[in-house]
Amino acid sequence: MFVALEHLLSLEEGYRRVFSLQGRSLLLMVVEGRTLLLENRCPHQGAPLHNATLAAGVLRCARHGIEFELLSGRALNAQCPGLVHLPLAYAADRVGIEL
């Protein structure tokens, strides 16, 4: 089942929005022309990532400073699991997720 999250026309560079879906917090972002959907939680201790800083493709958790390579999800400066990326789905003029 397709669940729409956003209109494609709204997806511009720097877009960042949190969605709640089936008890999960999801973060939809547009970075360097790519649309990404992540779990909105740091794998280190669960801090939300919607207020994380982003520079040169590196997402830095605001709570503990752990940095992640955004595209691969790999942690760069700590031993912890990587970011959880979710596959995007498209239907007509919307982007979303398949459940």
Image (cartoon, grey):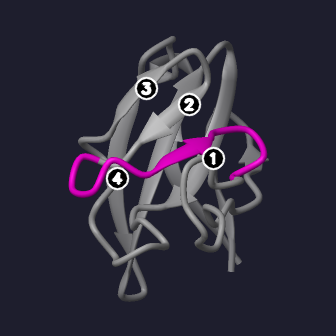
In the image, the segment drawn in magenta is: 62-73
Q: Distance between the residues labelled 1 and 2?
A: 9 Å
Q: Where is mark 4, residue-wise?
A: 49
- Mark 1 vs mark 3: which is more N-terminal? 3
Q: How far apart are marks 1 and 4 (CA)?
A: 16 Å
Say what amino acid the circle numbered 3 marks.
Leu
Query: Can you give x and y, in whole percent of width and height, for residue 30 in the image?
Result: 55, 26
* Labels 3 and 2 touching (C-beta < 8 A): yes
Q: Where is mark 1, residue-wise?
A: 76
Q: Is 64 colored magenta in this rendering? A: yes
Say what amino acid the circle numbered 2 marks.
Val
Q: Which of 84 and 81 is in front in this view?
A: 81
Give the label on residue 58, or none: 2
Q: Which of 76 and 71 is in front in this view?
A: 76
Q: What's the residue at 78%, 46% (across, down)?
A: 72
Q: What's the residue at 34%, 76% (across, down)?
A: 46
Callout 4: SS: loop
Q: Where is mark 3, residue-wise?
A: 54
Where 66 falls versus 78 (above or below)? above
